[in-house]
Amino acid sequence: MAKHKSVYSFLIEHRELPLLGVLALLLVAVNVRVPGYLANSWLNVLKNGSINMVMCCGMLCVLLVGSIDISTTAVLAFAGAVAGKLMGLGVIQNTLLMFVLGIAIGAAIGAVNGVLMSYGRVIALIVTLGTSYIVRALIPMNWLLGMNKVNPTQLTQSFKDSLINHELLGLPFLVWLAVLVVIGTAIFLNYTRTGRNLYAVGSNAEAAQMRGVHLNKIRVLAHTICGASAGLAGIMWLAFYAAIEKGSATGDEMFTIAACVLGGVSVTGGYGKITGVVIGALMVAFIDSAIPQMGIGNSMITEFIKGILLLFAILLNVILQRISAKQDLAGRNI
């Protein structure tokens, strides 16, 4: 019995490990079906998954406090569109300023979401749904910037080359940027007091408040970080595709949430590891890449497989949480 308990405890503490096993099996199966797939496609998978991985880092912070944000891709499109149009008008020519502007736009929208949710007592789902509609409605800003969409001719060549064609140790800057965001998120969550407070608020808000944690400020911060990561992703999207418009990334926010949940992040808050999120994001990226390689061109089948994996992850999370709760009760002789 003690042995079973130790196994359960290990799985509860490392919920991302079963997912890592599934990812390994998936890669082996695809590589057997399509010889040489992994050797030929791994770099494209990393590049395609980098944008989603950056958004996953922000979404992780929101999920940890027991909230959610479905406006991330709308913020991505808006930040990329505004920055891209300003570059087209000659207002901004510096790549670094593009990133600063994108992050600032996203952080501002995220902060508004957090304030409305925390201080206005509006449900996060409703707030971010409304934000998503409003922000996407603003993207065809003919009335403000004379813009329908941003196309490659409006972007400087140095900006388009910066993340895709410039490499370090064989990896494009786009991938390294995602790596830096992941490392920064890990340090923030694991080694700072504020980062640990995100876990505390999602795990037990009342206990966190008794310890002096300001719940509303932490929730606003989580949404601000999520918005900032979406704004950064918008600039990455603009550099990767050299274009952006109103419908860009529509629906991809569900892939971001799915990657987090697949990585073992609790949808009720209080638990989640950046390692699991990275694995989940890579799995979503590999599914997108691998299924067409296997001769399956039907996008519905791709979505079906993602849905099955998501349900499996949620079910696994629920089972592990129930086991954890039973062990806690048994330990207190209740």
Image (spheres, rainbow, N blue to C red):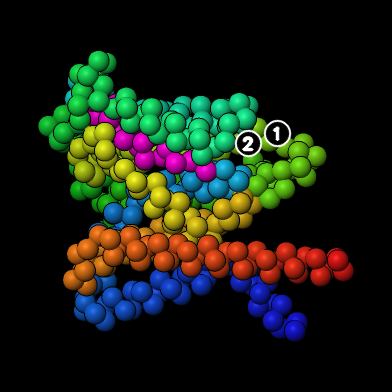
258 left or right of 304 in image:
right
Q: Which amino acid, by three-letter code, is at mark 2? A: Ile
Mark 2, Cα crowd under 10 Å, few <14 / some 14-19 / many 20+, is: many
Q: CA distance from mark 2 to mark 1?
A: 6 Å
- Whole-percent x and y of residue 79? 34, 31
Residue at the image position 33 percent from the left and 60 percent from the top: 303
State which region is magenta: 68-87
- Asked which secondary structure carries label 1, the reply is loop
Relative horizontal placement of residue 21, taking residue 135 as reference (left or right): right
**Residue 179 at what x, y percent from top left?**
41, 52
* Residue at the image point whose x is 55% and y is 68% from the top: 316
| Residue at mark 2 | 218
Q: Is residue 195 visible?
A: no
The quadrant of the picture occupied by the C terminus is bottom right
Q: Quadrant of residue 150?
A: top left
Q: Is residue 80 magenta?
A: yes
Magenta span: helix, strand or loop, mainly? helix
* Residue type (three-letter) at the residue carrying disc 1: His
Q: Which residue is mark 1?
A: 214
- The 10 Å Cα crowd at callout 1, few under 14, some 14 to 19, many 20 or more, is some
Extreme residue in the left direction: 153
Q: Nearer the viewer, residue 133 or 22?
A: 133
At a point 30% along the width and 43% down the height, the residue shown is 249
x%, y% of residue 225? 50, 37
Residue 240 point in image, percent of width and height: 24, 45
| Quarter where residue 154 is shown | top left
